[in-house]
Every structure is written in structure tokens, then in C-alpha cells.
Amino acid sequence: MKFIQRLGYYLSGFVVGIIMLMFFLGGKKTSCDWGLDARVLKDIRNKERVVSEDALVFFKEKQIDTSYISYILEAGDINFKQSNIEAKPCKIYQVEGEVDEQKLGLIFENCDSTAVLKRVFNLK
């Protein structure tokens, strides 16, 4: 079998496979969160979120809407150097993101069923 024939068979199978994937996964809300950042952020987003009084005071003083918490959890990054992933019973993560040209840091306590926003602060 010549190389051109093998290439043709390969490409036709590849195209059929892609079409099948698009058909089966097209209407579903699937995601490919493979990175460590993405997995942790998705885990926090999917849990019930509780906002502490300190965080609410910060948002009120800076006149920032609390809906930006969800935005930061979508577009933000986790600073693993400042996080404590060995903490028991709940891991503590520092999520960093930018809102209205302000860089914010959010400290989350990520437990089994809830994610508690403990503190919010400005980053330099």
C-alpha cells in the first residue's frame, strides 16, 4: 500500500472520528479542565459558597459588587505559593484576579461541601 493511500485512510478515519465527537459532545456542557488551577477553580465554583463578614465589609468599602467573585473564579489564577493545600480539614487557596483595574486576592477555605471566602485584599 502506498503512502498516499495510507494517508487517505488515516485522514478519512480522523475526520469521521471528529464528526462523531462533535455529534455526541456537541450539546453537552463538557469541559476539559486538566490543569491544576482549572480543577481547583472548578471545584470551588461548583460548591456552595459562603462569604464571611470580613469579605463583605471589603466589598462594601471598595464599592465592588459581590458578583465579581464568580468572575474571578472563572478568569483568575491560584497562587499555590501562598496557598496551604496541606491544611486540615479544609484546604486554603489564594485566588488572584483583576476587577475594574484592581488586582484582588481572595482567600478561600475549600471544604468538602462548601467553599468559604474568608478574606479579600488588594494585590500590589
Image: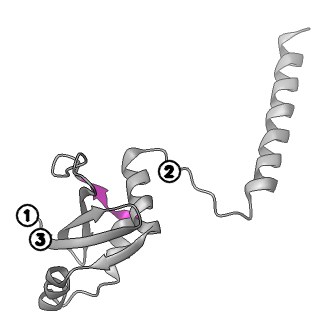
Task: Give how far across and how far down residue 84 sits, in percent.
Answer: 20, 50
| Residue at image mark 2 | 33
Residue plotted at (24% across, 52% down): 88
> In x, y percent, where is residue 94?
22, 59
Between 80 and 20, the residue placed more toward the observer is 80
Residue bearing the label numbered 3: 122
For the residue pair 85 and 45, the one nearer the viewer reads as 85
**Dot in front, 1 or 2:** 2
State if disc 3 and disc 1 touch (CB < 8 Å). Answer: yes
108 horizontally vs 3: left or right:
left
Give the residue displayed 85% in from the left and 40% down from the top. 16
Which disc number belongs to residue 82? none
Which kind of residue does numbered mark 1 sit on?
Lys
Marks 1/2: CA–CA distance:
29 Å
Q: Earlier in the sequence, mark 1 or mark 2?
A: 2
Residue, x 17% and y 73% (percent of image)?
Answer: 120
Q: Nearer the viewer, residue 89 or 77?
A: 89
Q: Residues within 10 Å of mark 3 (few under 14, many from 20)?
A: few
Q: Position of residue 1 (x, y in %)?
A: 92, 8
Q: Amino acid at mark 3?
A: Asn
Residue at the far left: name it: 124
Tell me the tag on residue 124: 1
* Precedes in sequence: disc 2 or disc 3: 2
CA distance separating discs 2 and 3: 27 Å
User: Which residues make up the magenta segment?
Assistant: 74-78
Above or below, comparing residue 114 to residue 112 in the picture: below
Q: Quadrant of residue 77?
A: bottom left
Quarter-of-image position of residue 68: bottom left
Q: Residues within 10 Å of mark 1 (few under 14, many from 20)?
A: few
Q: Establish if 1 lies above or below 15.
A: above
- The image shows residue 47, relative to residue 39, as above or below, that is below
Q: Secondary structure at mark 3?
A: strand
